Image (cartoon, coloured by chain):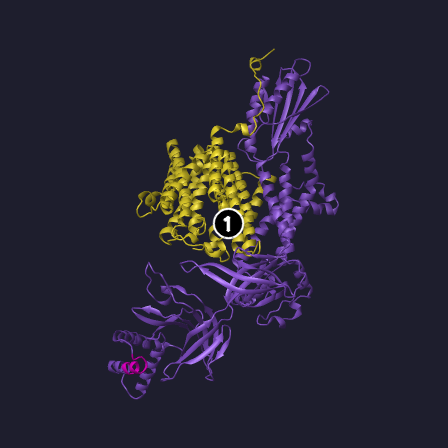
Amino acid sequence: MANTRVESWTELSPEPSWWAQWKLRDWAWFAGLSVAAGIILGLYGSSFGYWQFVVLGAWYGALLVAGLAWRPVQLASIGIVLPALLAVWLYSIGQTTANNMLLRDVLQGYAAVMWMSALLLAATACYLFYLFSGRERAGQWATALTWAGVIMGFIGLGVRWRETYLGHPDWGHIPVSNLWEVLVLFCASTPLFYLYYEKRNEARALGAFVMPLVAAGVGFLLWLTFAQHMDQIEPLIPALQSFWMKLHVPMMFVGYANFTIASLVGVGYLLTERSRRRGSGMLLRVMPSSEVMDDVMYKAIALGFLFFTVATILGAVWAAKAWGGFWSWDPKETWALIVWLNYAGYLHARVVKGWRGTAMAWWSFMSLWVVSFCFLGVNMFLSGLHSYGKL
Amino acid sequence: MQAHVDGLAWQQPRWRLLVQFLGSMRLAVSLLVLLAIASVIGTILSQQQPYQNYAMQFGPFWFSVYRELGLYNVYRTLWYTAIVAFLVLSTATCVTRNSPRMLREMREFPIRQRDTVILGQDHWVRMATTLPMDQAQERILQVLRAAGYKPRVEQKDGDMAIAARKGRYHRLGYFLTHIAIVVICAAALYNADVPVKWAEWQGTLKPEQNFDLPLSKIPRTAWMSQNNPAYRGIITLPEGQTANAVFELAGNGYLVQPLPFRIHLQSFHISYYSTGMPKDFTSRVVLYSPQGKVLKTGDVRVNHPMSYDGVYIYQSSFSDGGSLLHMKTYLLGASGAAPGELSGRVGQTLHAGNSGYAVDLKNFNLYNIVPKAAVGEKATPDHPTLNLGPSFTYIIHNPNGQAAEFKTYMTPMRRGGQGFFVQGYREALGDAYRYIYIPTGPNGSIGLFMDYLAALQSAARAGANASQAIFTETFQQVVARHAPGMSTTDQSRFLQAGMQTLVQLHDYPMPFILSLSSFDHRWAAGLQVTKWPGTIVIYWGCVALVLGIFILFYIPQKRIWLRLRPRGQESEGVELLLGASADRNRLDFTKEFKRWTGTLEQALGVDHAEYKEQKDGQHTR
């Protein structure tokens, strides 16, 4: 007795190999990155030390993988690099913020960061409106504004990198050397990773929990700018003049960004569970399922943990080169260890013991305080070798 | 991995219980959290300060309580090390206990599984199809291959077993991470001078507490062995000097570590940015063998250490290395006397004749690019800083035991066309400096003002009133005698400035002023010397750790077992039981499982399938 569906069955071919799954745009991405790396090597390769090859290789690999794992990175990178290169070119032909409006109002590092701040604040408002109203349109605006903010933030950092060289070539450095600059990096990278989790899980309502903290970061950044004038470009102290900074700091912020997201999703989880217990509330309408939130928390912590580990190791290696010891029990180092131990505990409890649910959401949320203290508290309240990040 | 504590545990031999306790997950998580909390202490209380500071902060009772607890150097206390050691032991036990099982799992993958095992997986499904065995098998294999698996088949007694897995090496991640932690901690313990701790505990090594002893006078009990496998010490070396030992802080004192070579500091150099911020610190160093042969010459810079034979030398700090200062002393109010001469090196105490006054030369600074506000000047946005040239700091003790600290700048500051000698002073250490500005005469020294002051005082002694006429008249006499070429505008500027200085001098605490006339500058570089043979082990441990974490998170192990049996007498076709699990990213795997079991239902023409009940929205603890 044959079934029609069985009759109409056509043979399935085995899963194509990894390469065969690449789309045309992926090949274009690969080719574009390779050409860019080739141009950089051709222009500057002769003056490279081994470490510049390491940095270039790390960026090449990271962008390649990120672009393949999450395709929007491809367009976003182009959206960041082209305007930044335009600004660099404008500076190179003698334009300045005084005689070029585009530089003055949009592209110069400071202006781009102000744009980023405005866009991210607007995005936060949209996410909150989306949460309360449930209007799809507001959610789309929120996502678009967040993307725009992220892109402006990275343009700002890229152009500022060039600006550190202007007028005083011996000052030049990657703009992650003081609190203002790393806060820009934090405000730009946290939404970027958030957008990944949002897209992957179709969970836009999470933005209403993640973005308010980013908005708080923006607020702090603006306070540093207008009250403390920390946006001034300053030369590097000798201890920071090392290529390890180019790897150590950005990787640290991949960790911070993901840990922050995990904590705030934890808040979302707890509040949603609370509404569920009460059997009412708008949260149940728009928030993703508990499994999804639980999964986002775990995924974010796992990715953050990987990068945090690498960054801490790079920091230790740098310390070994600069200060003569991997580990000096400097407050920043110790707090990095505390963060690491905390998340190691979390991951063991979740993966091995199989803990899920409210307890883990609380753990994830409380970790925010540990992470924030490591990021900001140490520099504000304790002294030590990392004191150049001081207020 | 989780300990499997069952009801029979109490019957097992004791060591087994111990092993189970050490390898238990609960202990591991507790230790991780405990270590995190213990680590906080050392960040709240600043570590390795001089004991007097702590005594002042806490009072005698708490000072001694905290000292006994080792809170002044938490990370080197026995109890902290014990927590780390326990964690290492727990990790090592865990690895040892789980290794055989995990290795076997990695090596072998049984195709045939009992039904109970299949039903114990996270997901399972029962289906029945009318397709004959060989056709059903062919289609199942196609579906699994399309999902990216490489299924294997085993046929026995009329039924068929199919199995597939991905992420075979997932367990490798477990080994790499946990072994890495053990290796890193072991190497760190080796580096944390365990032999020295041991010798200290035995009493053969005793830290010396007098920091003023010259090297040759330090008792041998404070000397560590030349063959010490790992050390980290510092030495402050003045330019032109040589040392063959470094110092390591230990508790309230220090230990001496002899070096296998002699370090000679040829020169020390600071380069600056245009803002006056230091740009680089460079020590030019020569290493000599004990016999005097040159081993190596080179620069030691921040971030660029020098290495020789496994020993690394780092630029860590700098200070004055005993610069030679030539000073002039001006007695306030000594009429017409030529200024006295005084010379000495930074660090020395000088006696001003037999007056009973003593001068401690504390420090010398070659550059002073200071914010204008720091010397009481108004800052302008364009020129916020001021270059005051070299300065020296000293304390003057008067015969009555009172003292004041002074900071004197060598280069006069210019203000409104008039040069000023700048000097700060304070009578208590924590106070801000108060500044006096003394106008300089045509030759750039304060001699003219001192003469004027003396003339005024002798006039006062002769009974003159403090009137404007007297001030001007006296000044004119002094100028005529000492600086006849001075222009009238300069004279009036000087006189005006001098009036203010006279007012400032009212509060001046000492009866003389020192000015710097020349100097022979000498730096001292603080070098850190380190020997850490465990370094390479730590590097490889770190590589293994990162690789392991990556494998654990991103190469999950997914396993699928299928069993096909003929349906029995009454109907043709086969019955199928399929179970599958992933040990990471279970949510993703649930989606994946739904996808290809859907395809499978289609391929086999299944009209009824029984799935394992998924507890929706429920979380198991």
Q: Is residue A353 visible?
A: no
Does B498 appear above or below B603? below
Most frequent secondary structure within the magenta stretch? helix
Q: Nearer the viewer, residue B481 or B106?
A: B481
Does A118 appear above or below B438? above
**Residue B520 % position (x, y):** 47, 71
Quarter of the image for residue B157 reads top right
Chain letter, yellow: A
Q: Nearer the viewer, residue A53 or A236?
A: A53
**Residue A72 % position (x, y):** 45, 34
Kindly identify which residue carries mark 1.
Answer: A243
Residue at point 44%, 40% (across, down): A191
Q: Quadrant of the C terminus of chain B?
A: top right
Locate residue A291 relative to residue B115 in the image: left or right. Answer: left
**Residue B352 % position (x, y):** 46, 81
In reply to whether residue B480 is colored magenta, the answer given is yes
In reply to whether residue A98 is colored magenta, the answer given is no
- Identify the colour of chain B in the image: purple
**Residue B273 % position (x, y):** 42, 58
Q: Nearer the viewer, residue B214 or A86?
A: A86
- The magenta span reads B475-484
Q: Nearer the viewer, residue A196 or A139?
A: A196
Q: Is residue B282 visible?
A: yes
In the picture as drawn, the residue positioned furthest to the top comes out as A1
Q: Secondary structure at mark 1?
A: loop
Q: Residues within 10 Å of mark 1 (few under 14, many from 20)?
A: some
Query: In the image, what residue type sits under mark 1?
Result: Phe
